[in-house]
């Protein structure tokens, strides 16, 4: 594909970073508009929140990447810090406590804000996976399907080159878009605060588990070789935990026209 979008005067613009930037702009715009309408979120608070989440996501994504092949990254620390690799679940698991901390520190209604962040996350993640597609990371297995995509640029991470591969990045981006549509549909119909956020987690865990069967970057490792990858294990764990939380929040956080968001 096109890991480098263009170069101007010695400045190189990478497709992955460019798409992440687009997703961030869309995410912040949604957060500002919905946050102001629903919970009185200010523009400065939205910017600060996004900055903290970005830092947490960077650290978390690199941390889980390190754990997937610790011996390699101990020997090549520069590859970990300077490389383009991230693990989404690592980013997400670090971002969640950061959000809770920020909401409490700024006295924002936690569960109502989580619903806003669910759609925000979809926007950033959706654009980010398109960036993965352009950069050739998170690629799929070889396929005879007419959907197969051939990577030829040596700078792409995808392997093998010159062979049709499942465009798993686009599968995931499209799936996240559908999840976002579901969340927007439920937004005016939710029964409790936090329902959108938990629905996002449940649906993403299901989709990610299924998507792993088409992923070709097997160096990320398995819990049970060829049967259960690290990401699938995390997806199952998240689904079980979130299902339990969904039951509890549905009883505790009931929506009411006479109650303030919580």
Image (spheres, grey):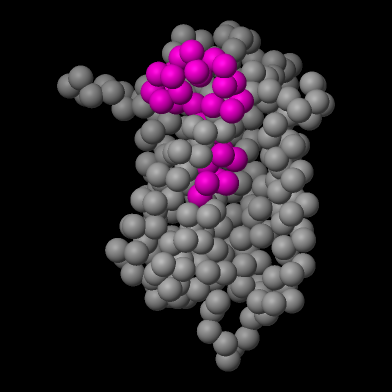
250 in the magenta segment: no
User: At which x and y percent is residue 57?
Assistant: 47, 43
User: At which x and y percent is residue 185?
Assistant: 63, 65
Q: Nearer the viewer, residue 34 or 235?
A: 235
Q: Nearer the viewer, residue 132 or 53?
A: 53
Residue 151 relative to residue 82: left or right = right
User: At which x and y percent is residue 71?
Assistant: 57, 16
Q: Is residue 195 above or below residue 62?
A: below
Q: Residue at x 54, y 50 (%)?
A: 122
Q: Is residue 62 above or below residue 238?
A: above
Q: Residue at x 73, y 16 (%)?
A: 144
Residue 83 relative to residue 141: left or right = left
Q: Residue furthest left?
A: 9
Q: Nearer the viewer, residue 213 or 111?
A: 111
User: At which x and y percent is residue 39?
Assistant: 45, 75
Magenta range: 66-95
Quadrant occupied by the C terminus: bottom right
Image quadrant in which you'd find residue 223: top right
Q: Is residue 208 above or below residue 147?
A: below
Q: Residue at x 74, y 69 (%)?
A: 248
Identify the main secondary structure in magenta: helix
Image quadrant in which you'd find residue 197: bottom right
Q: Nearer the viewer, residue 36 or 112?
A: 112
Q: Does residue 161 appear anywhere in the picture? A: yes
């Amino acid at each position: 594909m096109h890991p480098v979008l263009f170069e101007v005067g010695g400045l190189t613009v990478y497709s992955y970073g460019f798409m992440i930037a687009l997703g961030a702009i869309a995410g912040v715009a949604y957060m500002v508009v919905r946050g102001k309408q629903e919970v009185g979120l200010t523009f400065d608070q939205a910017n600060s929140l996004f900055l903290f989440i970005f830092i947490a996501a960077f650290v978390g994504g690199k941390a889980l990447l390190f754990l997937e092949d610790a011996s390699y990254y101990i020997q090549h620390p520069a590859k970990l810090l300077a490389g383009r690799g991230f693990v989404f679940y690592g980013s997400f698991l670090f971002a969640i406590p950061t959000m809770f901390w920020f909401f409490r520190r700024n006295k924002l209604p936690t569960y109502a804000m989580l619903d806003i962040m669910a759609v925000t996350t979809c926007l950033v993640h959706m654009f980010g996976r398109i960036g993965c597609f352009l950069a050739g990371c998170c690629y799929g297995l070889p396929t005879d399907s007419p959907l197969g995509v051939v990577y030829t640029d040596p700078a792409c991470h995808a392997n093998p080159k010159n062979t049709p591969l499942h465009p798993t990045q686009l599968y995931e981006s499209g799936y996240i878009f559908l999840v976002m549509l579901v969340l927007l549909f439920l937004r005016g119909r939710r029964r409790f605060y936090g329902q959108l956020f938990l629905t996002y987690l449940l649906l993403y865990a299901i989709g990610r588990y299924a998507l792993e069967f088409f992923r070709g970057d097997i160096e990320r490792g398995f819990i049970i070789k060829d049967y259960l990858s690290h990401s699938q294990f995390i997806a199952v764990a998240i689904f079980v935990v979130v299902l339990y939380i969904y039951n509890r929040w549905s009883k505790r956080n009931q929506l009411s026209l006479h109650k303030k968001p919580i």
